[in-house]
C-alpha cells in the first residue's frame, strides 16, 4: 500500500516525464515497482529527474514516447541514497598532468600584477603575429595558448 509521500514521489516523476517527453506516458506496474525501490532507498527526486532527463535527451523524439523508468533500474540502484548525480569526466594520465599545469598557469596569471600581465600580453601578441596567419585562426584561443606558453617559460621552468 502506498503512503502519501510515495504517491507524491510517483506523481512528481510521472509529471516530469510528461513534461520532458511531451507524451502522457502512464507508469507501468514495473515502473511503479522500480520507483518503489528508489523511494525505499531514499533516492532524491531531483537526482532521479536529472538521470531521466539525461536518458530522454539521448533518445530521438519519436522513441521518447516509449521511455520506461524500468530502463534506469540498473543504473539507479548503484546510486547511494545520499549521492547526487555526478557528471565527472575521467581523463587519461597525460591529460590530467596537462590540466594540472593549466590550473597552475591560470592561478599564476590571476595573481600577477597588472603591469606584468600587460607585458606578457604584448609579448604574446608579437609571437602570434610572427607565427600565425591571422586569417586562419581564432585569435582569442591562440592568444590564450601563447600567454600560457609564456607563463610556463617564465614561471614554471
Image: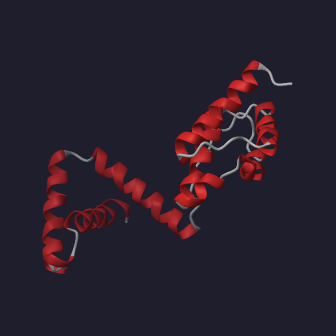
Q: Quadrant of residue 125?
A: bottom left
Is 146 placed left or right of 95 in the picture? left
Is 5 placed left or right of 95 in the picture? right
Is 24 placed left or right of 100 in the picture? right
Depth order, front residue of 113/141: 141
Where is the C terminus found, in terms of image quarters? bottom left
Q: Residue at x 78, y 38 (%)?
A: 32
Give how far across and how far down residue 82 sits, in percent.
70, 33
Give how far across and how far down residue 27 sits, in percent.
72, 41
Compared to 113, does 155 lie above or below? below
Outermost residue to the top? 4
Give how far across and how far down residue 43 sits, in percent.
72, 35
Depth order, front residue of 1/126: 1
Q: Residue at x 14, y 49 (%)?
A: 115
Q: Residue at x 58, y 37 (%)?
A: 16
Compared to 73, does 129 lie above or below? below
Q: How many marks?
A: 0
Give how far across and how far down residue 51 sits, in percent.
62, 46
Where is the N terminus found, in terms of image quarters? top right
Q: Quadrant of residue 77?
A: top right
Q: Residue at x 59, y 54 (%)?
A: 64
Please name the colour scheme applied to the rendered image.
Answer: secondary structure
Q: Quadrant of residue 26?
A: top right
Outermost residue to the right? 1
Amino acid at each position: 500500500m502506498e503512503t502519501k509521500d510515495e504517491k507524491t514521489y510517483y506523481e512528481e516523476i510521472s509529471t516530469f516525464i510528461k513534461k520532458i517527453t511531451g507524451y502522457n506516458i502512464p507508469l507501468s506496474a514495473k515502473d511503479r515497482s522500480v520507483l518503489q525501490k528508489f523511494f525505499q532507498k531514499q533516492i532524491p527526486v531531483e537526482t532521479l529527474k536529472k538521470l531521466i532527463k539525461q536518458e530522454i535527451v539521448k533518445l530521438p523524439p519519436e522513441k521518447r514516447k516509449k521511455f520506461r523508468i524500468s530502463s534506469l533500474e540498473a543504473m539507479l540502484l548503484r546510486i547511494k541514497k545520499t549521492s547526487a548525480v555526478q557528471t565527472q569526466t575521467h581523463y587519461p594520465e597525460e591529460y590530467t598532468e596537462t590540466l594540472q599545469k593549466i590550473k597552475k598557469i591560470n592561478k599564476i596569471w590571476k595573481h600577477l600584477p597588472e603591469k606584468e600581465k600587460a607585458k606578457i600580453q604584448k609579448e604574446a601578441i608579437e609571437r602570434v603575429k610572427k607565427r600565425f596567419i591571422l586569417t586562419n585562426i581564432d585569435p582569442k584561443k591562440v592568444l590564450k595558448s601563447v600567454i600560457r606558453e609564456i607563463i610556463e617559460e617564465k614561471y614554471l621552468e
